[in-house]
Image (spheres, rainbow, N blue to C red):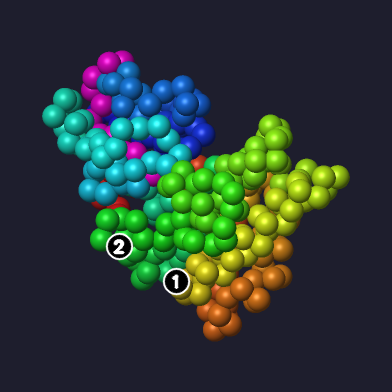
Amino acid sequence: MKQLFIDCGGTYLRSELLTPQGSHRDILPSASIGLWSFIEEAMEKHSDIGFIGVSYAGQVDEGVILASPNLDHEAPFPIAQKVKARYGIELRIDNDLQCALLAESAYWESDTCALLFVGTGLGAAVMDRGHVVRGSRNMAFELGHIPYAPTPLVCGCGRTNCLELWVSGSGMEKWLHHYGKNHHPNLQQLKHANDPKERAIAKGFEEGLLHAVGTLVSVSNPKLLILGGGVIDHNPYLIPYIRETIAHYALKPTLESLRIQHSVLTNAPLEGAKLLSRGKR
Ligand SMILES: [Zn+2]
């Protein structure tokens, strides 16, 4: 039996097809194909796929895609039910950050940990003594959408004061657009730009990131904080900077036994999607 694993992110759709002979990985821009079309194409090519695991950059609960601020998709969308009805196989889906948390916690052998990823969006997930903290609709720790500071911008969720507008690739891009600039946001370039407005975007990002980390650590009290995502990966100065300054942003006792580490898995959400097949949640 073949198994298909998908990481449907804000920028890329990554997949891995596991067969008895080995595995085949693929990567496509998310804008080029929707998740449902991707599954239809895969099932046409490989009718013997017996399980699908999906890590999804959006809100999902019990097999239903509820909302996806960073992706164009019809919601609510009962994807597990649709796959079962059409192909007779099981699909399990979870939020990408929660999938990443499952994979990283297994790697670090830590059962009380938090994860914060900064890429296209800003997201977090928390595991407390072996249990992923989910809330009533699997939306616990949607850190990107906590109210932070007013902006002239509009978040994917419709509000104008979300933390994600300050601390994310898409947020920095929106600020640049607001100032009439269309170049791709690069934190290092913004930090050293001649234009004070661009430097202010970088400053706003760093300050917002410290607030995000301090808030997450203070409210979830993890033993291990794992940081990752494209913006963290491309700016190696950020993790030492956070370690040096976090004392000003988090409750002191929560820092006493805290370790802060960079995500080590090449694609933690996809690795987490694989764990869904083993009933991890
Ligand atoms: Zn928002």
Q: Quadrant of the C terminus?
A: bottom left
Q: Looking at numbered disc 1 in the image, what kind of residue is underneath it?
A: Ser
At 69% from the left and 71% from the top, the residue drawn is 245
Q: Which residue is mark 2?
A: 135
Q: Secondary structure at mark 2?
A: loop
Estimate how packed mark 1 is, as few (under 14), some (14 to 19) or many (20 or more) residues with alpha carbons within 10 Å.
Answer: some
Residue 238, image x and y in percent? 69, 57
Q: Which residue is mark 1?
A: 220
Precedes in sequence: disc 2 or disc 1: 2
Corner quadrant of residue 176: top right
Residue 36, image x and y in percent? 31, 27
At 16% from the left and 25% from the top, the residue drawn is 86
At 78% from the left and 43% from the top, the residue drawn is 189
* 72, above or below 188, in the image: above
- Residue lying farthest to the bottom in this orientation: 253
At 43% from the left and 26% from the top, the residue drawn is 24
Q: Nearer the viewer, residue 150 or 1?
A: 150
Q: Looking at numbered disc 2 in the image, what kind of residue is underneath it?
A: Gly
Q: Secondary structure at mark 1?
A: helix
Which span is picked out in magenta? 44-58
Left or right: residue 37 versus residue 113 is left
